[in-house]
Amino acid sequence: MKKGLLLVIGLVLVVSLLLIGCESQESSGSTNGQGLSVPQNLSVSLTGGSSQQTGIWVSGTGEVTATPDVAILTLGVQAQETTVKAAQSEAASAMAAVVNALKANGVADKDIQTQWYSISPVTKWDDKTNEQITTGYSVSNMVIVKIRDISKAGTIIDAVTEAGGDLTRINGINFTVDNPTAYYNQAREKAMQDAAAKAQQMASLAGVNLGKAIYISESGGYIPGPYPLRDYAAGASASTPISPGELNITISVSVGYSIE
């Protein structure tokens, strides 16, 4: 009696498990045209779907030439003495003379900005004691100067070197456009035209019709950085030649087009 009851219970459990398995298979799959169950993870590939972006993707570049109208000069003074106080005093006097020279040549207060000020020990190695010893202190005071009249750049450099004497330091100069918006707009227009021409050619080669732009990304707006100059001090040439040349402003775009 007990064996018969256990056999019945076992058969019920087997049937239940088979029914659950069938329901699970039906819920986790789809049916193809022949009535066969197909797992969902295969249905995407069978229908040709894809998670990747489609269309024609190209990059375009636009470049325009600009004439600089502003010079950016990095200059200052550096003094070295046996004490911090003496070095500070000497650097302060030289810097005051440099600033006065800048203002006398038409540079406004708003166009003079402190970039770097430091006080650091000057050391050397002592062979007798086998250690570094402090021999003095160095004070540096550097500013960034915007020269709005480029034709006066050479004259200003000469005036600064005369005012600061041997303590004068000129680290670099670069040229830029004070308001580059118009140049950026021109470069951007050229970049988009370049991208559209590339995309149209690719569509023609592929035998498809080019659709509208569905994605646009911009990078660039590049203007060359500063040009290094040698340190100037008293005794520099009487007239310093400065040539601003031209600037190339470049913008790049990435554009995605749909296919009609």
Image (spheres, grey):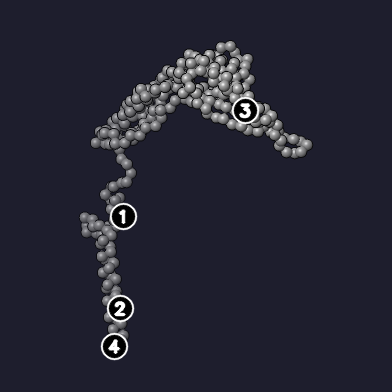
Q: Does label 2 or label 3 sit earlier along the sequence?
A: 2
Q: Quadrant of residue 186?
A: top left
Circle 2 packing at 10 Å, graded few (<14), some (14-19), many (20+), is few
Cα–Cα gap, marks 3 and 4: 110 Å
* Label 3 residue SS: helix
Distance between mark 1 and mark 2 Cα atoms: 34 Å
- For disc 2, the marked residue is 10
Q: Nearer the viewer, mark 2 or mark 3?
A: 3
**Furthest residue in direction bottom, as rendered:** 1
Q: CA distance from mark 4 to mark 2?
A: 14 Å
> In terms of depth relative to the viewer, which is nearer, 7 or 187?
187
Instruction: For marks 3 and 4, give the one nearer the viewer.
Output: 3
Q: Earlier in the sequence, mark 1 or mark 3?
A: 1
Q: Give the alpha-carbon distance from disc 1 to disc 3, as whole Å.
A: 75 Å
Q: Is residue 195 above or below residue 20?
A: above
Foreground label between 1 and 3: 3
Classify 128 as above or below 154.
below
What amino acid type should be assigned to the residue bearing mark 4?
Met
Write down the residue under mark 1: 41
* Residue of label 3: 88
Q: Mark 3: few, some, or many residues within 10 Å (few <14, many ≥20)? A: many
